[in-house]
Image (cartoon, rainbow, N blue to C red):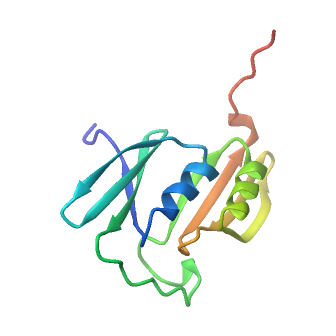
Amino acid sequence: MTNGRFEVGLVSADRRLVDFYAQVFEREELPAFEAATGTVHRLQFPGAVLKVMVPGVAPAPASAAEPFFAMTGLRYLTLGTYDLDGVIARATGTGGSVAHGPMELADGVRLVVLVDPDGNTIEVVEESDSQPASSSS
């Protein structure tokens, strides 16, 4: 193995995205740290860390004139869930929106494409056969 972790970074004008991702995906925030250019907030996901950099000087908003699939480059995140309906409800209740779906891709596989409050695209996939086993009492 050549790497020990995987991190994805977003840039936002304020910590609104930190709160959005923490609430929608039910993640706890790791300690933030101050960099020379601003504050880096972090959320722990299984096998990855989502970072939100809030610069000391407010960044210009990104233009969202084209759909995410119309340009090359890093255009969307894919996150897995065991509760797609809950993710959709929390996302739309905290400033996000649904761009496509929800839809069934295959037997037991559902997907929705969300847009966060800053206009970033998130593909969320639920696979019913990968849910953790429930314990019986």
Q: Which residue is at the far bottom?
A: 65
The answer to whether 58 appears left or right of 89 in the picture is: left
Classify residue 136 by image quadrant.
Answer: top right
Q: Which residue is farthest left? A: 36
Q: Residue 80, how many percent across, how many down?
A: 61, 47
Residue, x 56% and y 78% (percent of image)? 69
In what quadrant of the picture does the N terminus appear?
Answer: top left
Q: Is residue 92 above or below residue 136?
A: below
Viewer-closest of 57 and 99: 57
Q: Position of residue 119 (x, y in %)?
A: 55, 75
Q: Indicate left or right for 88 with 35 as reference.
A: right
* Image location (x, y in percent) of residue 102: 78, 62
Give above or below for 102 relative to 58: above
Horizontal side of residue 34 vs 50, given as left or right: left
User: In the image, what residue occupies the spot 44% across and 68% down?
Assistant: 14
The image quarter in which residue 90 lies: bottom right
Residue at (48, 72) in percent of width and height: 75
Which of the 4 image quadrants contains residue 65? bottom right
Q: Horizontal and vertical percent for residue 94?
A: 66, 62
Residue at (53% x, 71% y) in the render: 120
Q: How many marks?
A: 0
Q: If the image is split into quadrants, where does the C terminus sit?
A: top right
